[in-house]
Image (cartoon, rainbow, N blue to C red):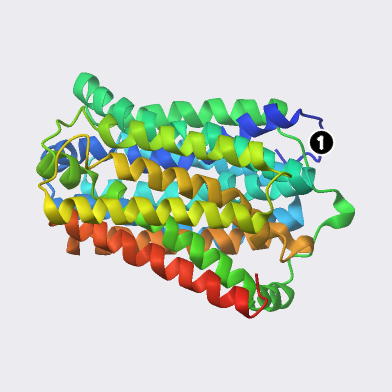
């Protein structure tokens, strides 16, 4: 798995492969959400302990994501992805056979340690292989295919849990890992030539991390993405309460949230790809923020005056994720291009910041999931902070 084999791949084919790799994250988070109650009953665990299986995955994902990119800068992209997917598959097998909640927490943490390799390195591969508008198009194509995962994962997980029990969800993740590994072994190119690789020297790495994580422009872009995504992630992590308690949806009806939202993501990613090279980056971001802002305002206004109901509690979220998917390819490229010689490390730090934000979101969301109005006002606050951050940094010529 350490071979430095250079292969060729079409932009579309590579986008599909990288989207499958990036989908490891959504499948690992969303697929087992409908089975949380069953896991608690089967393992005789309190609801809070079961909820912590999500944090047990996200925190190691965030911490280890700091290293995946730096390691790939030194050893190459291909071998890091192959090793990461292989160990993720083994961790998924461990989850499927976990006899206690403590064992499940351990194997979920091991999933988090390894899953980030495919996400972090995949972004760096896009910037290694493509430049300018083509890079934005490929990044958008990745997002377009990737958007299917949040729609499919909870629906598939819900039905697997009903038909075969909660352990089958993790068995599916293991099979998915095997599929990704085989496809990567056959088709994934090594995009980083040996002469462009960085050394794995502790002092050099420490200086590089400090340089990346203290760059104001990079931090502004990454924190803005974190806040924007958290505005939707609060609904993902609170899905069992938001859908079942507030909207009275059955455990097999999670498609009500994830299906329309994924459709919004796909349309936003498609429009981002179409506008690459035609709209200036600032115009793309401005349109995206206006759409997200309007959606968040409508969501809050509706629930200020009305009780939660289908489909009205879902429709504004569709437009929010549409704007989010329109903005993310541009923001991602801008962030990685701050450090063109160390895109792997930049991708690692970007993923670390976003995932740490998601972990905090997952830990704190019980504070706001008591009502749909509190979720909506939290979304507005997160988006407003992101907009203010980008606006302030732009006035300082950092963006």
From the top left corner, tell me how far across and down residue 337 is, in percent. 72, 60
Q: Residue at x 16, y 46 (%)?
A: 241
Residue furthest to the top in view is: 163
Direction from residue 320 to residue 115 in the image, left or right: right
* Total labels drawn: 1
Picture quarter with the C terminus = bottom right
**What residue appears at the point 55 percent right and 57 percent down from the top-left corner?**
286
Q: x and y percent of residue 334 in the render?
A: 67, 59
Q: Quadrant of the N terminus?
A: top right
In the displayed structure, would residue 307 be above or below residue 206? above
Q: Residues within 10 Å of mark 1 (few under 14, many from 20)?
A: few
Q: Is residue 316 visible?
A: yes
Would you place residue 277 above or below residue 210 in this image?
above
Q: Name the residue at 47% across, 48% down.
A: 323
Residue 366 in the image: state x and y as whole percent.
19, 59
Q: Quadrant of residue 157?
A: top left
Secondary structure of residue under mark 1: loop
For residue 313, above or below residue 186: below
Q: State the residue in front, 296 or 398.
A: 296
Query: Which residue position is annotated with label 1?
Result: 5
Q: Is residue 48 visible?
A: no
């Amino acid at each position: 798995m350490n071979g430095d084999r250079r292969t060729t791949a079409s932009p579309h084919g590579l986008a599909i492969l990288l989207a499958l790799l990036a989908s490891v994250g959504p499948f690992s988070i969303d697929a087992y959400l409908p089975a949380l109650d069953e896991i608690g009953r089967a393992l005789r665990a309190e609801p809070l302990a079961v909820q912590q299986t999500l944090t047990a995955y996200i925190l190691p994902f965030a911490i280890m994501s700091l290293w995946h990119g730096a390691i790939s800068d030194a050893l190459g992209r291909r071998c890091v992805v192959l090793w990461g997917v292989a160990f993720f598959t083994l961790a998924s097998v461990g989850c499927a056979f976990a006899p206690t909640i403590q064992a499940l927490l351990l194997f979920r943490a091991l999933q988090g340690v390894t899953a980030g390799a495919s996400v972090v390195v995949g972004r760096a591969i896009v910037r290694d292989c493509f430049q300018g508008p083509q890079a934005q198009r490929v990044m958008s194509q990745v997002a377009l295919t990737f958007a299917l995962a949040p729609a499919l994962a909870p629906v598939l997980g819900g039905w697997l849990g009903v038909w075969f029990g909660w352990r089958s969800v993790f068995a599916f993740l293991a099979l998915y890992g095997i599929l990704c590994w085989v496809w990567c072994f056959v088709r994934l190119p090594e995009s980083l030539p040996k002469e462009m690789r960085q050394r794995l020297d502790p002092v050099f790495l420490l200086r590089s991390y400090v340089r990346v994580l203290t760059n104001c422009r990079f931090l502004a872009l990454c924190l803005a993405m974190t806040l924007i995504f958290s505005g939707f992630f609060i609904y993902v992590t609170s899905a069992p309460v938001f859908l079942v308690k507030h909207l009275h949806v059955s455990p097999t009806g999670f498609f009500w949230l994830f299906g329309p939202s994924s459709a919004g993501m796909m349309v936003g990613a498609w429009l981002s790809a179409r506008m690459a090279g035609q709209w200036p980056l600032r115009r793309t971001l401005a349109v995206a923020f206006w759409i997200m802002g309007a959606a968040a305002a409508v969501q809050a206004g509706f629930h200020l005056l009305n009780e939660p109901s289908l489909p009205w509690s879902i429709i504004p979220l569709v437009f929010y994720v549409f704007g989010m998917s329109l903005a993310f390819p541009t923001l991602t490229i801008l962030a990685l291009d701050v450090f063109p010689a160390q895109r792997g490390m930049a991708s690692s730090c970007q993923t670390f910041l976003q995932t740490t934000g998601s972990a905090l979101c997952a830990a704190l969301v019980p504070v706001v999931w008591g009502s749909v109005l509190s979720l909506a006002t939290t979304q507005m606050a997160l988006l407003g902070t992101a907009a203010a951050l980008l606006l302030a940094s732009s006035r300082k010529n950092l963006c």
